[in-house]
Amino acid sequence: MEVQDLPEKFRPSPPGGAPATEDVPRPLAGLIREATSGLTGPEREVFLRRLKEEHPGLFSRKSGEERHQLSGEPAGEFSEEEWREEFTRLLKEEANRFMAAAAGL
């Protein structure tokens, strides 16, 4: 199986096209790095794309920093523990998608 045979959401983005942890507020960037430390580069990229789909405002660093300063919480939307739970949920969903795609090969 070749990369081009994979569904679009599993393909790597072109250079510069993938979201990066540098695009989120600093407190969350550390949580994301921690949550994705066991993933490969392409797996981390898929996770970040999914995170951006579900939380588009998160990847606007300026607004994220402003929200953090105003609220005192990472990105203002959730507490640190709630973000951990959200990352865990998304990672589990992505793992299930990869397993389902692999089973279909």
Image (cartoon, rainbow, N blue to C red):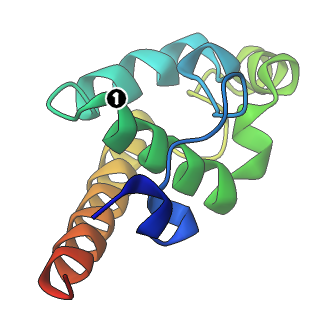
State left or right for residue 70 relative to residue 29: right
State left or right for residue 40 relative to residue 4: left
The residue type indicated by label 1 comes to Gly
- Quarter of image, res 90: bottom left
Percent coordinates x, y for residue 9 in the rendering: 53, 64
State left or right for residue 34 relative to residue 45: left
Percent coordinates x, y for residue 38 in the rendering: 14, 31
- Quarter of image, res 5: bottom left
The residue wearing badge 1 is 41
Quarter in which the C terminus is drawn: bottom left
Q: Is 7 placed above or below 4 here?
A: below
Percent coordinates x, y for residue 17 in the rendering: 72, 33
- Between 34 and 38, the residue placed more toward the observer is 38
Q: Residue at x 26, y 54 (%)?
A: 88
Residue at the limit of the structure toward the front, as seen here? 2
- Between 80 and 21, the residue placed more toward the observer is 21
